[in-house]
Image (cartoon, grey):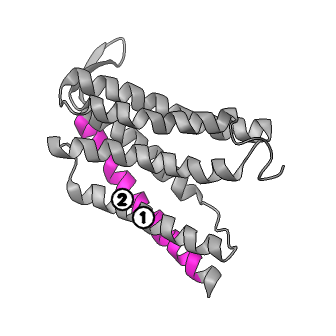
Amino acid sequence: MSLNSGPIWNLPNMLTLLRIALIPVIAVLLLSPSRESGFWAAAVFAGASVTDWLDGYLARRMGIVTTFGKFLDPIADKLIVMAALVMILPFGRVPAWMVLVILGREIIITGLRGVASTEGIVIPASNLGKFKTIFQIVAILGLLLHYDYHWFFSVDHPFVNVNMHNVGMFYLWIAVVITIWSGVDYLKKFIRVIS
């Protein structure tokens, strides 16, 4: 399968572009801290996150992995995560230092990838990066929902009141730890490759 096989305007790349197009929608929804706005922002964010998995799956399945897609897909992931976190900062739903850690890691790793690519070096993504993304997505969904929700739990205790902000923060702590860990891991690989 050639890296440049298939046209740029294929289904996987269109899904990636759709993910980017949904960023302003999420941003507008998050201009208000209301429960309804948070719910719909979480729904749009969840839909966008599904396209992240779907575009990669389709690209491999259809054999149309393109350079454009390889470049755009991780950028789209970073943009939508950062947009959601930045938009909820004014509401005090997330500590600014956590957002800075996540943003800083992404800027540093993107810069290192750029330097490596100019030297013709490809440093493959590790599973840590995938876990980081999963925990970030789950954390952001919780933080967007923010309020208490009644969830079906069991027959004996049919509904349990769950504070989604606490759920989001629990997963965000894990995401931050993995973010730092994966960043250090990538930096060590980069140093090993260029030295």
Q: Is residue 132 magenta?
A: no
State the residue at coordinates (42%, 59%).
179
State the residue at coordinates (71%, 40%).
59
Q: Which of 7 and 16 is in front in this view?
A: 7
Three-letter code, disc 2: Leu
State the residue at coordinates (25%, 24%).
37
Residue at which label 1 appears = 107
The single residue placed furthest to the right in the displayed view is 1
Q: Does the magenta stretch include residue 184?
A: yes
Q: In which quarter of the image is the C terminus?
A: bottom right
Q: In this view, does 129 lie above or below 141?
A: below
Residue 155 image label: none
State the residue at coordinates (49%, 69%).
111
Q: In which quarter of the image is residue 41?
A: top left
Mark 2 packing: few (<14 Cα in 10 Å), some, or many (20+)?
A: some
Q: Where's residue 15, x and y in %?
A: 59, 33
Three-letter code, disc 1: Ile
Q: In this view, does 101 lie above or below 16?
A: below
Instruction: State whether residue 170 appears in this view.
Output: no
Magenta stretch?
Answer: 165-191
Q: Nearer the viewer, residue 46 or 19?
A: 19
Q: Where's residue 64, x and y in %?
A: 76, 42
Q: Answer left or right for 54 relative to 180.
A: right
Say which element carries label 2: helix
